[in-house]
Image: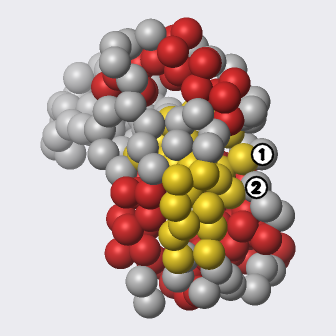
Amino acid sequence: MPVVDVKNSKGKKVSQVDLADSIFNVPVKSSVLHEVVTMQMANRRSATAAVKHRSDVRGSGRKLFRQKGTGRARRGDIKSPLLRGGGVVFGPNGRKYAFRVPKKVRKLALKMALSSKLQASELIVLDKLELKEIKTKQFVDVLNALDLKNALIVIDKNDEKLELSSRNVPDVRVLRSEGLNVYDVLKYHTLVLLESAIKNIEERLVA
């Protein structure tokens, strides 16, 4: 079972915490991480343009007027492509890029991402991170004390002061534990976990 030092917001060691082997000590496979990250990026993509064809347009299927005797062109229903508001004939059908990966694979990939950070000594655990007010300077002072420049900070619950103070700081993101994902863990150089957030992560990823 891995043991990690717990630091305070000034960078000093205050205690130690045991991390679960089943989550933070998993063999890392790049193919699994690649598959899940690809899925996340694909799901963020917007679908291409699409039009409504004759079968997609809302309208009555009744023939507008009789076939013969009116002197007008032969008309079917109001959804004809020749009429205003009718369907489009040869327009694009649209393409959606989203796809799904099995839940077990997604969960395994997140475990691998966390394990990779621990193995690379890029994981920091803090006892707490509290700000007195919404102030970017206070948040930057904490980052400087911990020597963090590119980091993902995972908190256990909603913290308006911390989240608002961090949003203008480049290359740093504050994320709640329920939103933890493979892409963000791998994107940032350092992963910072609040000690209280570790329990939430372990409950979420328990086998």
Q: What residue is shown at x 42% (from left), y 83% (from top)?
A: 206
Q: How many marks?
A: 2
Q: What residue is shown at x 63% (from left), y 40% (from top)?
A: 11
The residue that mark 1 highlights is 189
> For numbered disc 1, what is the local secondary structure?
loop
Can residue 27 be seen in this snapshot? yes
Label 2 environment density (alpha carbons within 10 Å; few <14, some 14–19, many ≥20)? some
* Residue type marked 2: Glu
Q: Position of residue 45 (x, y in %)?
A: 62, 42
Nearer the viewer's eye, disc 1 or disc 2? 2
Q: Which mark is residue 122?
A: 2
Q: Are marks 1 and 2 in contact (CB under 8 Å)?
A: yes
* Residue type marked 1: His
Q: Position of residue 158 (x, y in %)?
A: 29, 38
Q: Position of residue 2 (x, y in %)?
A: 64, 80
Q: What residue is shown at x 46% (from left), y 17% (from top)?
A: 165
Which one is in front, 53 or 113?
A: 113
Split into 4 quadrants, where in the image is the N terminus?
bottom right
Which one is in front, 114 or 129?
A: 129
Q: Is residue 123 above or below residue 93?
A: below
Label 1 environment density (alpha carbons within 10 Å; few <14, some 14–19, many ≥20)? some
Q: Position of residue 90 (x, y in %)?
A: 62, 38
Can residue 84 be seen in this snapshot? no
Split into 4 quadrants, where in the image is the C terminus?
bottom left
Q: Quadrant of residue 111?
A: bottom right
Mark 1 or mark 2: name the one nearer the start of the chain.
Answer: 2
Q: Quadrant of residue 112?
A: bottom right
Determine whether, in the image, residue 107 is placed left or right of residue 150. Answer: left
Determine whether, in the image, residue 155 is placed left or right of residue 70. Answer: right
Which one is in front, 119 or 91?
A: 119
> For numbered disc 2, what is the local secondary structure?
loop
